[in-house]
Amino acid sequence: MADTHPAVSIVVNTYNRGAWLDDALRGLAGLDYPMFEVIVVNGPSTDTSAAVIARWGKSIKALRCDHANLSVSRNIGIAAAAGEIIAFIDDDAVPHPQWLRRLTAAYRDPAVGAVGGFTIDNTGTHWQVRKVVCDRYGNAHPVTDLFDERPLNRPGSAFFPSLLGTNASFRAQALRGIGGFDHTYAYLLDETDVCLRLVDAGWQVHYEPHALVWHQFAPSHIRSGECVARTLYPSAVSKGYFITRHGSPGNLAGAGEALDSYRRELLDVNAQFAASGTIDARHRHALDQDLLHGLRDGQRLAMAAGHKTVGDLAQVAQRPPRRFQPFAVASGRRIALISRGWPPHNDNGIARWTQLVAQGLCARGHKVHILTEAIDGARETISFEQGLWIHRLCPDEASARTGALVERYGLPWRQAAWADRVWQEAQFLKSFGLDCVSFPIWDLEGLPLLDDPDFVTVVSLHTTYALAQPFKPEWTERPLLAHRQVAPMIAAETAVLARAPHCLANSRAIIAAIADRHGIDLAPRATVVEHGTPDPWIRRAAAAEARRVARHDHAPLRVLFVGRFEQRKGFDIAVQVAQAVIDMPNVELAFLGGELDGAARALINRLGASAILHHPRIHFAGVVQRDCLDDAYVGADVALMPSRFESFGLVAIEAIAAGLPVLTLDAGALPDVVRDDHGGRIFAQGPDVVQQIAAELVWLNVDREELALRADQARAAWAARYSTEAMAQGIEAFVAHVLATHAGKA
């Protein structure tokens, strides 16, 4: 094969897995390979699979298989394949971007008929299958990575290399030459049978350790998501058929022993599952019967097949394949975003911003990795979700490297442990071909990456420890915390800001605040891209219209405070406004985003506002999920955000997106967002600020026409400046500029 990059046809066989299929196709769009087509063969699916396939349109070859039979489906894919190499990947799997390059390299040897890679299981961090050899009874025998499978590639070999179907490729000439797949293998051993017949036909079957696939183990009609069998009949048929066809001719007694061993093994598994409560007695009985009938029918079919040596491709391949149809790969950059928090388990400002940026860049064709922390107690995982690679990581504070980072950068131990784990994962991602990495200034999550010349690294500007310090009295009240945590972090922040080559800011105010607090002018190195947020009216248009009518009808004015119950967020001011609202008969105020715990209650009592705790027009909803928060925005009339500092003010733009006038203080970036022409009002920080805000609420309650006008202004401002699309476009341009600058210096 003269061409080092032969044309490849990738076949995806799917059946009732629409929820996974779209991600599988997105994963293929991330491949780094010059010439491949994608063939999707849809079984008799009754879910959303057809709609998913339709969305991909002419970019794929879409075919139909009317039988829930994997081998028939595979042969339909082979019949449509116009490539020199035919690769198979499951509909719940995603490849490494170098997958095809690694697989096809071995085909330079004309004797090679099949190549398979290593497969990672649904944790994303553990192997499902590496090198395996099979015997002629269909039993798999794992071997070490150093095992040389090449001597087993000889006709009649008792053991032979066997590839996993979700990570296998075949020379089209070889696969068609043996007649493709045998339709008797509706499920299980289909690819094992093909590998055996290839070896017997004189072809070589090889493993390529660096051709990686992540297999996510989606539930199917055969098994549950926990890999518990729903039925054993198809797999038992395959096993009985395989042993009788391939094992009996060489050793009839051995084949009988293999059948008995398989039967006993699965009956024992069924019994264990029943004893543990995994399955009930009826399920166990059904599986036992499936097994016995399947083995019997498999043997019968093998005897009826006689000396058949070829597959059943001829039954579906009635004409030459259509011309090669190149698949459009994602042309964007490969970008890693680091955020210790990630929604929905953490919806703080940086976590939310990171998610919105990731989704926006993904929608624009970029390949995005998220490096975030695993939930407490959870194991590490790597998964591909809605087009995003999510790396959920566990820092190791006992690592020797953590101590080295503490020594080198002066980081507190906890921050150093996380930064070290991020650095390790970034080393692995070098094989993906990362173009750019971004980490937040808060907690300095990716600090060691600044010193790795293989990365183009961006620091995103948010509130720093130094900026938060004036609003964190507990930091100064606890001298040990100030000494061991706060002071080292501020020093490390200042050092990073002094040397970070590229900074991304979401407001001019954060650049000015850093200059004031850290004494560093970032203006020459920072680019401002304003924050964006999705449209909360999507799926809530009826609720938005109902609220518009309610305002017109002088229903009670609904005021919404969203934020943590702390001084920086102006919770104390909001509490005093709530006390004033008690005297306004047609005004309600709801608090979201914080818990009404002992500290919050103590503050309310100190402010002389204990009456709000049980007042019918004051509501404390606690910390809510994103959907509930968007419901609250759309169902409100005015947003109260008396924050004393915001690097941007995500709550403000979320409220503006819902069409809410925002009342806030003259602090940080808020005056840039909450402007008069955006329907908002800015109040100076002073002793009478509560009275001014209360008076504003009185007026908006009286003049509903002005309220409606300002609601329209807010909504128009979001559409013009603060959509996620606008933010993603701005960050895309910023990344392009950074990479061009870096290339110019190389």
Image (spheres, rainbow, N blue to C red):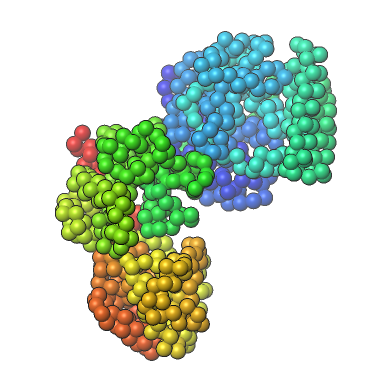
Q: Tell me if 571 is positioned left or right of 242 in this view.
A: left
Work out whether 10 lies above or below 225. Answer: above
The spot of residue 456 in percent (x, y) is: 28, 39
In depth, the one of 445 and 526 nearer the eye is 445
Q: Which corner quadrant holds the C terminus?
A: top left
Q: Position of residue 367 (x, y in %)?
A: 40, 43
Residue 113 or residue 210, whichever sits in front:
210
Give me the residue at 49% from left, 43% from top: 384
- 9, above or below 249, in the image: below
Q: Residue at x 44, y 66 (%)?
A: 594
Give the camera-side residue of 596 and 676. Answer: 596
Query: Does residue 296 appear anywhere in the picture?
Result: yes
Q: Quadrant of residue 462?
A: bottom left
Task: Name the image quarter holding residue 167.
Answer: top right
* Residue name at image x 49 percent, y 82 percent: 615
Q: Is residue 169 left or right of residue 690?
A: right
Residue 732 placement (x, y as % from top left): 31, 49
Where, by quadrant of the figure, is residue 286 drawn?
top right
Residue at 32%, 52% in the rendered image: 481
Indicate whether 395 appears above or below 178: below
